[in-house]
Image (cartoon, helix red, strand yellow):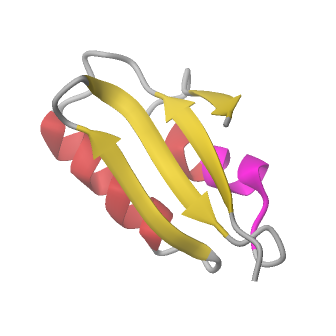
Amino acid sequence: MDTIDVLIHVHPELSAENRAKVEKEVMACDGVIAADFDRHQHPHALTVLYNPDQVQDKQILEVVRRSDPAATMVGM
């Protein structure tokens, strides 16, 4: 199985509660293996490890945009 990492930036003022919600919702997507915010250095950066045969990065971004419509994706 091949995996890909993607980095998604959310608004820096997105609350810790909403960041936890985003992690949970992204983890619920088929094909997502891990979804974690860097709570120490970059709390607004979500790293997602996923299987591209099961989910596309754009689908993951749409899940994040439910909580932050301005979220942006950066490839890794």
Q: How many labels does the image show?
A: 0
Residue 8 appearing in the image: yes
Q: Residue furthest top?
A: 12
Rendering coords of residue 38 (x, y %): 28, 37
Looking at the picture, tell me which residue is in the foreground, 21 or 44: 44
Q: In this view, does 51 lie above or below 59?
A: below
Position of the C terminus, as image quadrant, is: top right
Q: Residue furthest right?
A: 53
Rendering coords of residue 51 (x, y %): 71, 72
Looking at the picture, tell me which residue is in the foreground, 61 or 52: 52
Identified at 44% across, 26% down, the residue is: 10
Residue 67 appearing in the image: no
Quadrant hosting residue 35: bottom left
Predominant secondary structure, magenta span:
helix
Write down the region rendered in magenta.
Answer: 55-62
Rendering coords of residue 32 (x, y %): 57, 71
Q: Is residue 64 above or below residue 29?
A: above
Quadrant hosting residue 54: bottom right
Q: In this view, does 29 lie above or below 70?
A: below
Rendering coords of residue 36 (x, y %): 35, 52
Residue 64 inside the magenta-drawn segment = no
Quadrant hosting residue 53: bottom right
Identified at 46% across, 31% down, the residue is: 68
Residue 41 left/right relative to 57: left
Identified at 75% across, 83% down, the residue is: 1
